[in-house]
Image: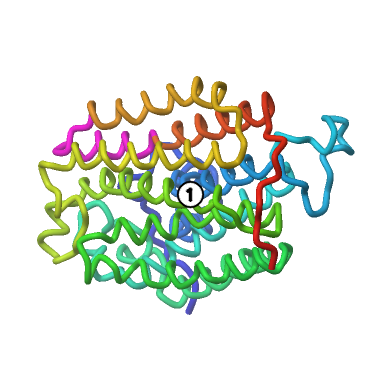
Amino acid sequence: MIMASETDSTVADASPGNWVDSLAPKATRPFLRLGRLDRPIGAWLLLWPAWWSLALAAAEAPLGWKWAVTGLGANGEGLPDPILMVVFLIGAFAMRGAGCTFNDIIDRDIDAQVARTASRPLPSGQVTVAGAVAFLVFLSAIGLAILLTMNRLAILIGAASLVLVAFYPFAKRITNWPQLFLGLAFSWGALLGWTAFTGSISAAPLVLYAGSIFWVIGYDTIYAHQDVKDDARVGAKSTALLLGATSKPWLAGFYALGLGGIAWAAWLAGVWMPAFGAIMIAGAAQMAWQVVDLDLNDPANCLSKFRSNHIFGMIVLVAIVVGQVMGPSSVPIPGIDI
């Protein structure tokens, strides 16, 4: 049997009154919760590195559809391809849902022992394992269909990410650094966005990928501080448990490296740095506020700071686009075509 049970209860860390709990048909709610559509912040955080990468690549010649047809300029230099932005938006929500479903299948016994996760659809009995597997296949098919519309190199890079996605649920069992593996997986869009647009890979997306990894380690360490007591009890590992009360200076370091990597990638891509830097002052301030105002012993505060990284993602995108539009590089960026 693959149907959801008749149990209909909200998930502990979902925002009150979210659209799934208030508007979605009752029969679909457990599956929408399983795919985190009641808590979409994870999909947005997965999407931002891909959109950053598309924006960085905007000065490169597109492979197919041209901005020129919109009348927005000669080939739209400096503006990210809107079609690819929509494609990645759909893909991020589908693959975030698939990844969470797979993670919840693997972790269902652990989740049942943690206060914050015990209300998730699988441990709470809202969805059966068979139903979760069917939902995982459905979401994966959407992701595959999207990936197959891209060029060959992008397909290869996208497929390679599945190794990280498959390993991540097991990382907390064997290493104190599962946040690193989440960073490797969640930052993959930095490589895929550039490649989908240009058909090549170069230094800029690789540096962006590295910077994004440090950003993810930082915000997921904050997220993990919600569960330190339960994680210690059930034997799950995390950087929050490893670093404990010393987490704040580590977070400052992770965020500084993330910010530096993003800025370096922008410079490599030919972004006009005065405009980029002026806007990124707000990004640096947002990161600093997270660290300074963070209360490691208050789960609600940790969740709020984690969610605020959506704002940081928007700031970076605006900074890149403005920097590209105001002064895109006239120097071709070398790439490796495959």
Q: Nearer the viewer, residue 103 or 241?
A: 241
User: How many numbered discs sit on the rendered protein?
Assistant: 1
Quarter occupied by residue 219? top left
Q: Is residue 296 magenta?
A: yes
Q: Position of residue 327 (x, y in %)?
A: 67, 27
Residue at x 73% of width, y 43% of height = 81
Q: Position of residue 75 (x, y in %)?
A: 83, 38
Residue at 14% across, 66% down: 235
SS state under label 1: helix
Which residue is rendered at x = 43% and y = 22% of the image?
Answer: 281
- Say whether residue 64 is left or right of residue 54: right
User: In front here: 67 or 297?
Assistant: 67
Q: Position of residue 44 (x, y in %)?
A: 50, 44
Q: Quadrant of residue 41?
A: top left
Secondary structure mostly seen in magenta is helix
Above/below status of 170 relative to 245: below
Question: Which stretch is magenta?
Answer: 294-308
The amino acid type of the residue labelled 1 equals Val
240 with respect to 220 (left or right): left
Question: Does the segment drawn in magenta span residue 265?
Answer: no
Q: Name the residue that disc number 1 marks.
A: 207
Q: How are the colours assigned in the image?
A: rainbow
- Residue 188 point in image, percent of width and height: 50, 57
Q: For mark 1, does the 10 Å Cα neighbourhood hold few (<14), some (14 to 19), or many (20 or more) residues?
A: many
What residue do we see at 45% from left, 55% from top? 186
Look at the image and tell me in which quarter the C terminus lies. Answer: bottom right
The vertical placement of 201 against 18, above or below, is: below
